[in-house]
Amino acid sequence: MNKIIIVADDLHQSKGVCYDLIKGGMEPELCSLSEFLSHADNIQSSTFVLDITDQNLQKKETLLPFKKISEICLFFVLSYVSDECAKLEAFSAGADDYIEKPYHPKELTLRIRNQMKRIEKQQDPVSTKDSQVFLNIYIDEKTRTVKINSKPLLLTKKEFDLLNFFLKNRNRVLSREYIQESLWKDEYPKQSRIVDVHTHNLRTKLKNNCANATIGSRRGIGYILEKKK
């Protein structure tokens, strides 16, 4: 859950918030309130900073989408509104914190970072004999299930085997030949592109589901599961 999106009804005004977060070592993205509301049903795990005016904060349709995604996302409200009712509405909608303007830039980044750390600790499963953990990816060999940020990831049988193999050999460059011999034995000829095809599909699924790891390519050698840069 390392993606930070600033949802704003005034993009120009929110550039200052974006700058403060960048200065604090984060990589925020700006998104208009109207754009967010139109895509709210397809939201994936992220951290949201809702930077809006008094008028929009008091509209129920503004907070309703956040209430729906609060279980999988961190949600901060940033506003000049100091009214107690507005704060209660925000927290009722699932807000993790309410930060009044004007704020100190360092306070903003620390409050967001501390909440992110808390969530990471809650989602950090421990490796066992039957399971593997790498960053925000969790795989259980016994039940053949995979989770990213505690959210199930659907994989084919071979994609699961491939990810499990990469996890057991994380941060190591594996040749195509070694991967093919380990997972496919003699099912395909050595010049087959079977490893490349499955690796491409798996890499895409990891990316689309906000994995903090990626499968990197080493030209002429093979592949490596490593932390996303």
Image (cartoon, grey):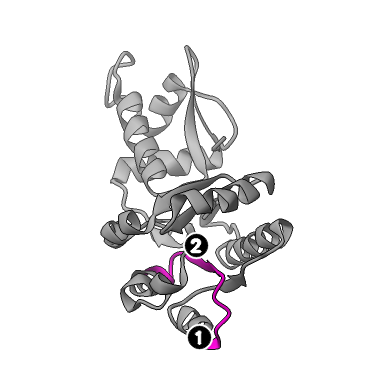
Q: Which residue is mark 2?
A: 51
Q: CA distance from mark 2 to mark 1?
A: 16 Å
> Residue 50, percent across and down?
48, 63
| Residue at the image point whose x is 28% and y is 56% from the top | 39
Q: In the image, is 229 to the left or to the right of 6?
A: right
Circles 2, 1 touching at the beta carbon (< 8 Å): no
> Residue 42, percent across and down?
29, 57
Tell me where the magenta segment starts and ends, as one range: 69-84
In the image, 25 versus 125, the foreground residue is 25
In the image, 184 versus 2, the foreground residue is 2
Q: In the image, is 178 to the left or to the right of 41?
A: right
- Report the quarter where the C terminus lies: top right
Q: Quadrant of residue 163?
A: top left
In this rendering, does residue 141 appear at all? no
Q: Quadrant of residue 121?
A: bottom right
Crowding at dot 1, Cα within 10 Å, few <14 / some 14-19 / many 20+, comes out as: few
Vertical position of residue 33 compared to residue 63: above or below: above
In this rendering, does residue 164 appear at all? yes
Kind of residue at badge 1 = Leu
Q: Which residue is mark 1?
A: 88
> Residue 20, percent across and down?
64, 50
Q: Quadrant of residue 183?
A: top left
Crowding at dot 2, Cα within 10 Å, few <14 / some 14-19 / many 20+, comes out as: many
In the image, 23 versus 150, the foreground residue is 23
Q: Which one is closest to the eye, mark 2 or mark 1?
A: 2
Q: How many marks?
A: 2
Vertical position of residue 52 compared to residue 19: above or below: below
| Residue at the image point whose x is 39% and y is 70% from the top | 56
Kind of residue at badge 2 = Asp
2 or 1: tag closer to the N-terminus = 2
In the image, 31 versus 177, the foreground residue is 31
Callout 2: SS = strand
